[in-house]
Amino acid sequence: MTKKTLLHESGTLLMIMLGTAIYALGVVAINIQNNLAEGGLTGITLILRFWFHIDPAISTIILNIPLILLGYRSMGKKALFYTIWGTGSLALALFIWQRIPIISQLNIEHDLFIAAILAGLIGGFGAGIVFKFGGTTGGTDIIARILEIRFNLPIGRTLLTVDFLVLTASLSYLNVKQMMYTLFASFVFSNVVNFTQEGSYSAKGVLIISQKYAEIGQMIDLKLERGYTYLMAEGGFEQDQKKVIYSVVSRAEIPALKELIMQEDSNAFISIIDVHEAFGEGFSHNKKKTRLFTRR
């Protein structure tokens, strides 16, 4: 591993840790202090906290262990490491924030509207940072990934279903008023996540100009299992003929795509554009079957 790659990886891990710390701050300072629920696995930890007095930091680890063991085959080594790192960082942040006196005094229950906005803003900003750098906090993300691979169920639909079930279960300790403010916080949360990730579209178009277009194209095919097209172009200054790679990938695959391009050619020119709609293999149809062996 080169020094540049090591610095890049270290920076990524630090940003994921920062994102989980911000997200955990929202959970502890706003959701817990003002009796607002949360979706996904975090919502389950809040239910366990209320009924069984289990520290969310501990239940986050306990609940994620079987999910990680269940989904490790569905994730690559890097995704698995990022998931473990994000889960551990989140648990650590939850543990620390709960033990800082000033945090436990941020009770604005007299104005749940402000509490809901803050919960969405802080949590969404933190989660957005985590997702932007290719990380995850585990939980329902793992379940959604497994169901997508095995049963071709859209990730968004799975996450929405799980959130609905968790929020419904949260009515066991919240009243309807608190739940409605929780739903408002979830709306703010999702929009802030999209904003933090610099776009709300499901797909990104990528134009790549590189002398190593063949190698980069091969890696897009093998590592991301995405198709690509060569566009014939002419350089404006030197008037030379060249091939430009065009590919459409999901927003979550952008960090991995950048990394594999930089591994092949650090001088490559990359332009990423918003795609309003994407149809075809990998988006509206099944992805190609994973190869048993990878060529290099």
Image: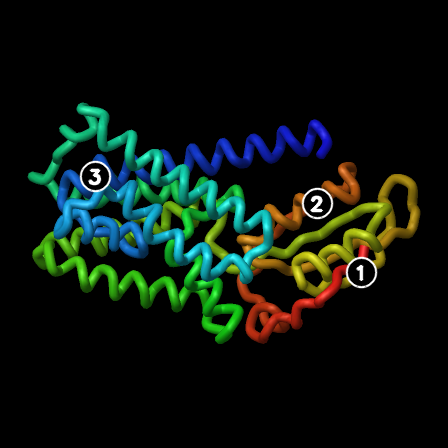
The residue that appears at 67% across and 44% down in the rendered structure is: 259
Q: Secondary structure at mark 3?
A: helix
Q: Quadrant of residue 179?
A: bottom left
Horizontal and vertical percent for residue 151?
A: 49, 75
The residue that disc 2 covers is: 270
How far, Cα to Cα, is label 1 from label 3? 50 Å
Image color mode: rainbow
Quarter of the image for the C terminus: give it.
Answer: bottom right
Q: Secondary structure at mark 1?
A: strand
Crowd rating for badge 1 (residues with CA inside 10 Å; few <14, some 14–19, many 20+):
some
Horizontal and vertical percent for residue 273?
A: 61, 52
Crowd rating for badge 2 (residues with CA inside 10 Å; few <14, some 14–19, many 20+):
some
Q: Position of 39 compared to 52: left or right?
A: right
The residue that disc 3 covers is: 30
Q: Which of marks 3 and 1 precedes in the sequence?
A: 3
The residue that disc 1 covers is: 230
Quarter of the image for the N terminus: give it.
Answer: top right
The residue that appears at 38% across and 54% down in the rendered structure is: 139
Tag in front: 1 or 3: 3
The residue that appears at 36% across and 50% down in the rendered structure is: 191
Q: Are marks 2 and 1 in contact (CB under 8 Å)?
A: no
> Which amino acid lies under the numbered mark 3 shown in the image of this protein?
Ile
Q: Secondary structure at mark 2?
A: strand
Horizontal and vertical percent for residue 170?
A: 17, 58
Q: Position of 119 compared to 296: left or right?
A: left
Q: Position of 82 compared to 294: left or right?
A: left
Q: Position of 143 compared to 231: left or right?
A: left
Q: Which of marks 3 and 2 precedes in the sequence?
A: 3
> Which amino acid lies under the numbered mark 2 shown in the image of this protein?
Ile
> Which amino acid lies under the numbered mark 1 shown in the image of this protein?
Tyr
Q: Quadrant of residue 122?
A: top left
